[in-house]
Image (cartoon, rainbow, N blue to C red):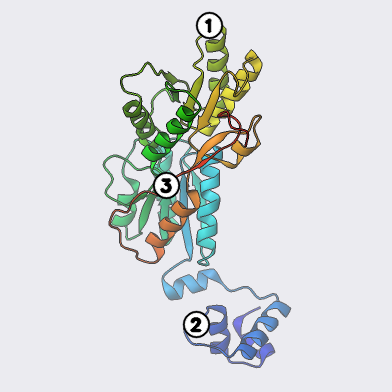
């Protein structure tokens, strides 16, 4: 079915049908709009995106590059980005870098070849500034959550320092003055900033820095080993929810009671955190606000001057020792 078929069925001109399907550039009377939409539905008509792209030199498609699509944190962020773009009638293509800088560069090149209108990049650590490569090709790009150290493109991130300070302050309210911090084997980017904030906040104390891979299995193994050695700290802040969930599993296997013997707070706040046993207290990252800000930067030509990072919200549940 074509635009002409819809026009004939609706008793309207092809120009009017085009205005309805494209939401402009000229207004259409409400009764006429309803007639055109009814005719399109009856004929099962779908606008041809390729033809529209050829006319407008835009595709209506945005590329989203994820550092790791299997991680619930990035999956939740992707959902908010897709929703924000959908509200602008944009289609989202998602590419998974799998924490590989080489794969990230490959995904960006493929998106540019597909002529996306813009890129949102949740950057993997290391590798080239792929946002700069995109903008050199005439495609606007913005980083979310993380960016290469050399990058000049804007980044939309959360206030990691405030999240760490809020978590530590809450644990201190429970009497824990030396909360340990669990990070990765090589922490850079946002996790590195969280570690630096913790180090500054506990300077002069005996608070311990713990390390393991960013997986549930690694955190569970570490918790069991430290508990067996009678070396598990009584309070821990984890850099990620994946590690926090692993700590809970390891504590359960080792017979360590949470929160009675171990108080725990995580710094991501993914949806999974509300359904652990006990439920995790978290600093919930402002993923929706970050996604909406990134979309505004791409589509609305919003000023690219630095803005204050969005604040995470402390969500109090049972793992810290509270009853909520």
**Is 210 left, or right, of 226 in this rendering?**
left
Taking depth in this image into account, of 26 and 217 the one nearest to the observer is 217
Q: Residue at x 55, y 51 (%)?
A: 79
Q: CA distance from mark 3 to mark 1?
A: 37 Å
**Disc 3 vs disc 1: Cβ atoms closer than 8 Å?**
no
Going from N to C along the chain, the mark reached first, 3 or 2, is: 2
Q: Secondary structure at mark 1?
A: loop
- Image quadrant holding the C terminus, namely top right
Going from N to C along the chain, the mark reached first, 3 or 1, is: 1
Disc 1 target residue: 229
* Residue at the right extreme, as displayed: 42
Q: Nearer the viewer, mark 3 or mark 2?
A: 3
The answer to whether one can see residue 268 in this image is yes
Disc 3 target residue: 311
**Disc 3 vs disc 2: Cβ atoms closer than 8 Å?**
no
Taking depth in this image into account, of 52 and 64 the one nearest to the observer is 64
Q: Residue at x 73, y 79 (%)?
A: 42
Q: Which class describes the residues within 10 Å of circle 2: few (<14), some (14-19), or many (20+)? A: few
Residue 165: horizontal and vertical position, in percent?
40, 35
Residue 185: horizontal and vertical position, in percent?
42, 22
Residue 60: horizontal and vertical position, in percent?
48, 66
Q: CA distance from mark 2 to mark 1?
A: 70 Å
Numbered tag placed on residue 24 in the rendering: 2
């Amino acid at each position: 079915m074509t635009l002409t078929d819809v026009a004939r069925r609706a008793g309207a001109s092809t120009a009017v049908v085009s205005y309805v399907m494209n939401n402009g550039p000229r207004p259409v009377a409400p009764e006429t709009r309803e007639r055109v939409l009814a005719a399109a539905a009856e004929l099962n008509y779908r606008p041809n995106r390729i033809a529209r792209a050829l006319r407008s030199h835009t595709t209506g498609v945005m590329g989203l590059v994820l550092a790791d699509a299997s991680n619930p944190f990035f999956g939740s962020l992707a959902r908010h980005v897709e929703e924000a773009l959908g509200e602008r009638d944009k289609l989202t293509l998602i590419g998974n870098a799998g924490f590989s800088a080489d794969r990230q560069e490959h995904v960006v090149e493929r998106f540019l070849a597909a002529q996306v209108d813009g890129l949102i990049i949740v950057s993997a650590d290391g590798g080239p500034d792929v946002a700069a490569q995109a903008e050199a090709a005439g495609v606007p790009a913005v980083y979310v959550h993380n960016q290469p150290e050399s990058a000049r493109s804007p980044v939309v991130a959360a206030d990691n320092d405030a999240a760490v300070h809020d978590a530590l302050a809450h644990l201190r309210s429970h009497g824990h003055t030396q909360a340990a911090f669990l990070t990765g084997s090589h922490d850079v980017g946002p996790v590195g900033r969280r570690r630096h904030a913790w180090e500054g906040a506990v300077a002069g104390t005996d608070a311990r820095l713990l390390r393991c891979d960013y997986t549930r299995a690694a955190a569970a193994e570490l918790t069991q080993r430290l508990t067996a050695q009678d070396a598990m700290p009584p309070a821990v802040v984890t850099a990620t929810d994946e590690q926090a969930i692993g700590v809970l599993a390891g504590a359960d296997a080792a017979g360590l009671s949470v929160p009675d013997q171990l108080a725990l707070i995580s710094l991501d706040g993914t949806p999974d955190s509300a359904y652990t046993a006990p439920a995790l207290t978290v600093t919930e990252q402002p993923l929706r606000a970050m996604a909406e800000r990134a979309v505004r930067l791409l589509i609305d030509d919003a000023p690219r001057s630095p803005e204050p990072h969005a604040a995470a919200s402390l969500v109090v549940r049972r793992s810290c020792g509270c009853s909520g």
